[in-house]
Structure formats: structure tokens, C-alpha cells
Amino acid sequence: MSVTQEKVLAFAIVEIRQLLAGYLGSQSTADLSVRIAAHLAYALHNQADAVLEGKPFDTQQALRGFGAIDGLLGTEYERRLPGLMTELAGQAP
């Protein structure tokens, strides 16, 4: 198996999800940043598993996961990601 950049990052997401699983849900009293990190890792762990298995995943479903976090915790990830992609595209050499 070839270890790619994508697989390294996917592995980290899966591990972070396991480490932060106890901070999920509306009853968690952890710091908001920890709760957000837990929910981000949880929202993306199935996609991370797909990357590790060499399979594709639905990017729109991943974006909807961001939207769910936004609704639950008051973040703006679903809106911010497309803006970041546009900004980075403008900086490409």
C-alpha cells in the first residue's frame, strides 16, 4: 500500500475522531473549540475511511456535514470552505 498525503491526513482525522469521541453531543461541557474539533472529525471520519481504503466519497455529503456542525455549534464551515478555495485559486502560480 502506498502512503499518500491524502492517506496521512485521513489517518489523522480517524485518530482525532476516536480521541475526541467523548466530546460529541449537546450535553458536552467541554470548551467550544474541543467540541467543534470533535464534531469536525466525526463529520469527516467516513470520508477519511474511504480515502484510506482507496475509494471515492461524495464531497457534497461532506459539505452537508459542515452545515450540520454550523447549525449545531454556530460555526460557518460550509460557507467558508468555498471562499477559501476561490481565494487559493487566485493565488495559484
Image (cartoon, rainbow, N blue to C red):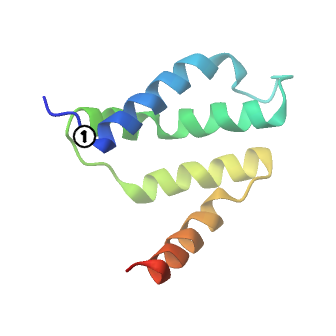
Q: Is mark 1 on a helix, strand or loop?
A: loop
Q: Horizontal placement of 22 versus 61: left or right?
A: right
Residue 3 in the image, given as x and y percentages of width and height: 22, 33
Q: Is residue 80 above or below residue 75?
A: below
Amino acid type at circle 1 is Thr
Where does the N terminus fall, quadrant-wise? top left
Q: Horizontal placement of 15 versus 40: left or right?
A: left
Task: Spot the residue most to the bottom.
Answer: 90
- For the point 67% across and 46% down, the residue is 69
Q: In this view, does 85 lie above or below 43?
A: below
Where does the C terminus fall, quadrant-wise? bottom left
Residue 68 or 55: which is nearer the viewer?
Answer: 55
- Mark 1 sits on what residue? 4
Q: Is residue 9 above or below residue 15?
A: below
- Assess disc 1: are there few (<14), some (14-19) or many (≥20) residues with their C-alpha within 10 Å of its C-alpha: few
Residue 20 in the image, given as x and y percentages of width and height: 63, 21
- For the point 80% across and 52% down, the residue is 74
Task: Spot the residue most to the left.
Answer: 1
Residue 85 or 55: which is nearer the viewer?
Answer: 85
Indicate the quadrant where residue 81 lies: bottom right
Residue 64 or 85: which is nearer the viewer?
Answer: 85
- For the point 82% across and 36% down, the residue is 32
Q: In this view, does 90 lie above or below 22?
A: below
